[in-house]
Image (spheres, rainbow, N blue to C red):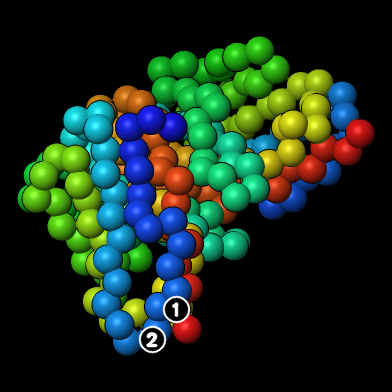
Amino acid sequence: DAGITQSPRHKVTETGTPVTLRCHQTENHRYMYWYRQDPGHGLRLIHYSYGVKDTDKGEVSDGYSVSRSKTEDFLLTLESATSSQTSVYFCAISGTGDREGYTFGSGTRLTVV
Amino acid sequence: GENVEQHPSTLSVQEGDSAVIKCTYSDSASNYFPWYKQELGKRPQLIIDIRSNVGEKKDQRIAVTLNKTAKHFSLHITETQPEDSAVYFCAASMSWGKLQFGAGTQVVVTP
């Protein structure tokens, strides 16, 4: 879909290293979200942002931090990667919060070895 | 916080039959309920949604119903086709536009 891209698409990293995933949007949407997807758990919210420099924690935020210095970019950082953070990470954007659904990015498959 | 339960976890149907997926939610303040379809290796995509002031919504072969009193909502797919095979997620809204997702239903349509 146009308007939201994630990078990288795939990454393999070693335990203990920091990792940053990037979400970039061209829709000028206010709301951005990071989810992780694991079998049997669906999509779980890690962190979200409701504006530049306005971020908050989701249900599985331990070991993750985020930053949003510009409307278009939302960065997710794994401060010290662990094997339990091996997952598929999806970024999502929304223009109006709870009045419309998300548009998801293509996802980042992260493997921590 | 909101909790969303989704059933069944897997659903096998013959082509042409109907499929029904059910979700329950816990927070009576939730007012927006979207459904997403995710094909293998792809991103989730919105297929239909419903708001709390509406009881039913249809879009061609798919429909969603909402029972606010019982706090449950369902996805109905009629005349299933092989391209309906995917994982389907329900979700319920929380504050700041956050969505709480169900665990997903793997739908397999056999010809």
Taking the spot 66% from the left edge, 12% from the top edge, the residue there is: B60
In the image, residue B34 above or below residue A106: above
Residue A61 seen in the current view = yes
Q: Nearer the viewer, residue A27 or A49?
A: A27
Disc 2 chain ID: A
Asked whether, in this view, residue B66 is left or right of residue B83, the answer is: left
Amino acid carrying mark 2 in the image: Thr
Taking the spot 33% from the left edge, 32% from the top edge, the residue there is: A3
Q: Residues within 10 Å of mark 2 (few under 14, many from 20)?
A: some
Tell me the residue that label 2 is attached to: A15
Label 1 residue SS: strand
Q: Measure how far apart labels 2 and 1 are at the Cα level.
A: 6 Å
Label 2 or label 1, whichever comes before in sequence order:
2
Taking the spot 34% from the left edge, 38% from the top edge, the residue there is: A4
Position in image of residue B6 (x %, y %): 60, 47
Verify CB contact (< 8 Å) between mark 2 and mark 1. yes
Asked whether, in this view, residue A2 is left or right of residue B25, the answer is: left
